[in-house]
Image: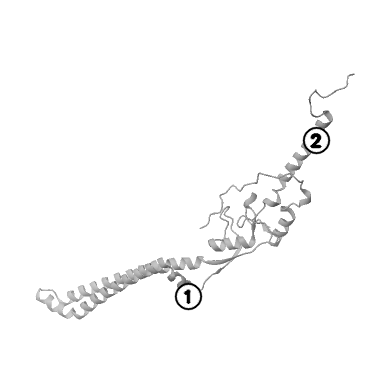
Amino acid sequence: MLPVTAPEGSSCNLNDCDTQQQMSLGLGQQHRQITRSLVSVGSIVCRICHTNTSKESLISPCRCKGSLAYVHLTCLERWLNQSCRSYCELCRYHFNVIETPRYRWPESLRIWISHPRNRRNIQSDLLIFTLLSVVTVGLVTVCLLGMQYFVIEGKKIGISKLWTRGAIWFFLTFVVLGYITTVYLLGKDQVAPWYRWWRSTVNVRLIMDPQLFRRLSNESFPSHENQTPGIHVTQNPRCPTNSPQHQ
């Protein structure tokens, strides 16, 4: 039998081709194994500060997947405090947190008033309150001091004393109720926004399961010994939700 030879002009023989096929299959299998386990260590970073240092471990505290699932505990607490939230803005997962008021009510009131927009609103409402108070006090004073005069003038045109006094007291009641209602609405427009802001401005402290840190440190980050040099994963898993948006 004639020996089997490679075609003329070929740069490799049959044994070399078999060797290259085996090497490519082995590299492909390792590539798929690394891809299935996780992305490379260098690409796993905190989704808030975009770093991965040895000072603090990365955790995955919510339902987010892929490269957006990992975050530092301190970064997450800082983000929740700045956004005044207790849930993940991506997957809407509610964290187990302890919320404490950030300010006492006198301090919060001082901060609220020091804001230029709030200060302008307070000044305009105070001006309305002052003018309304002056008008109301003037009407009440005129009616009470001039009641006897109105009674005398009413008799001249045939109106009894009882009807004159009743009409004056009805008018005074209407004026006083209108004044009280207006002052209440003015005060509500100022107090209600401040109270909502004060109650929502809290310090958030996360309560995390210690097993989460142990599980992530053992499973989520493959060691360098298990990776083949020269293989880089270029595609990272993506979380299906939107990226964080600052308020």
Camera-nearest residue between 217 and 51: 51
Above or below for 181 versus 30 = below
Residue bearing mark 2: 22
Extreme residue in the right direction: 1
**Residue holding disc 1:** 106
Furthest residue in direction top, as rendered: 1
Residue 57 in the image: x percent, y percent? 69, 59
Nearer to us in this view, 214 or 28: 28
Q: Secondary structure at mark 2?
A: helix
Q: Secondary structure at mark 1?
A: helix
Residue 168 horizontal side relative to residue 179, left or right: left
- Residue displayed at 48% across by 71% down: 108
Q: Is residue 15 left or right of residue 218?
A: right
In the picture, measured across the screen, residue 12 lies left or right of residue 44, that is right
State which quarter of the image contains the N terminus.
top right
Closer to the eye: label 1 or 2? 2
Residue in the picture at 79% in, 34% down: 20
Number of on-image labels:
2
Q: In the image, what residue type sits under mark 2?
A: Gln
In x, y percent, where is residue 66?
A: 64, 49
What's the residue at 32%, 69% (across, down)? 182
Q: Residue at x 54, y 62 (%)?
A: 82
Q: Residue 236 location in percent, x, y?
A: 65, 46
Of residues 165 and 46, which is closer to you in this image? 46
Category of crowding for the residue at label 2, using alpha-carbon neighbours closer than 10 angstroms: few (below 14), some (14–19), many (at least 20) = few
Q: Residue furthest front?
A: 9
Q: For residue 124, what is the image quadrant?
A: bottom left
Of the numbered discs in the image, which one, if any, rests on residue 50? Answer: none
Q: Gap in Å between the C-alphas at discs 1 and 2? A: 75 Å
Say which label, 1 or 2, has the lower sequence index: 2
Left or right: 29 with respect to 115?
right
